[in-house]
Amino acid sequence: MAESVPKQITYCGVCSLPPEYCEFGGTVKKCEDWLKEHHPSLHGKLYSQEAIEQNLSTLSLEAQKRAEKDSQKKAAKAAASEARAQEQRDNSKVLIKRIERNKRKYVTAVQGLEAFGLDIKKVAKDFGKKFATGSSVTKIPGGGEEITVQGDLSDDIYDYVVETYKDIPEDNVECIEDKKKKAAG
Amino acid sequence: MFKKDISAGSKSKVKSSAQRGIRAKILEQYPKLEEHIEEIMPKKEQLDLVKLPDRVALYTLGSTPLFFQHMDDPILPHLTIVHKYPDAFPRLRIDRGAIRFVLSGATLMAPGLTSPGGRLPNDPEDPEGRYGKEELEAGEVVVIEAEGKETACMVGVLTVGTAEMKKTKKGQACDAGHYLGDGLWGLTLG
């Protein structure tokens, strides 16, 4: 067995590419700041005046312009998509519903977790494990899916969601009580 | 292949006999990987097969992706493997102008390789033989590096032999398999 060590590569914490390629992503500025903070030596090498000049010199003037335009477009796109994601995040709510099933029996339904980039199947499993109850993903009539947990756990789930998923602001989590819809039948 | 973001499908364990087969196939395809194979996929470890959309199979070890394969096409390495063992694969280099196209998922065109900034095997501007001496045939797996960069940016399959590419200098050169920032790159395995 040869004792060659695998080459260690640092990846950018912002766009996940090797730092050399950050300039081709849409978040150059952020990437640069990140690199400066975490790997100052690399930052010096990649963002020095010489390096930038050398990069530019290899392209024709026209191609440079085109590349610049392209990268601007990309940056704008990235910023826009980020803003949209942020907005969606702010607007979406997690609903925790207590539904009466049979007088003193309840189930708890949790909606809207997927808007925060969570895999609801996995979360359902976690709920089941944490609270030692049945927990499943069910389809709701209006389209989409929700997590149904057996038992009245609305307060526990509220605490758990706020505690474990730091991405979700507490204001966006809401508990509501649903009176039985059984009357429909 | 992975222009859009993808999500992993079912994950299953690979039989140890199949694992041996995969290992042999990889070694046959990339003989220079021989000395590293034990580090990449130790004999004793359990490989996993993750199904991806479009009948792509991804072989992983724990949560690190190693190689992927579309049906019975050649097995391609994941870029993190390429970054770790850059010497083990046949390499080509593209000029600076082509990088942004490659990173947005375009098919690699021949001029990007034949221009002064690009490198093909047996290049007069490459005295140390970093990019190999042998001409490569169509259908071979190549790793694409970029001018002025140290790390590779793409893995793909040649559609035209390098000898012919030097003659015509036109048309598609290499199918985009896996490039930096694509869906496979962004894939996180739980």
Image: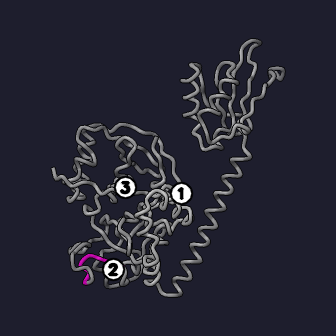
The picture places residue B64, in percent across and down from the top left corner, at 38, 46
Mark closer to the observer (3, 1): 3
Amino acid tagged 1: Lys
- Residue B165: which numbered mark, if any? 2
Task: Find disc 1 in the rendering and name its residue.
Answer: B4
Mark closer to the observer (1, 2): 1
Mark closer to the observer (2, 3): 3
Q: Which residue is drawn at 71% across and 52% down?
A: A87
Task: Find disc 3 in the rendering and name its residue.
Answer: B80
Q: Which of A31 and B43 is in front in this view?
A: A31
Is residue A162 rendered to the left or right of residue B164? right
Q: Residue at x 21, y 76 (%)?
A: B128
Q: What stretch is highlighted in magenta?
A: B118-124
Q: Which of B171 and B49 is in front in this view?
A: B49
The picture places residue B189, in percent across and down from the top left corner, at 45, 44
Amino acid tagged 2: Met
Q: What element carries label 3?
A: helix
Q: Which of A72 and B178 is in front in this view?
A: A72
Mark found first going from the N terminus, 3 or 1:
1
- Residue A67: which numbered mark, if any? none
Q: Which chain carries label 3?
A: B
Above or below for B24 versus A112: below
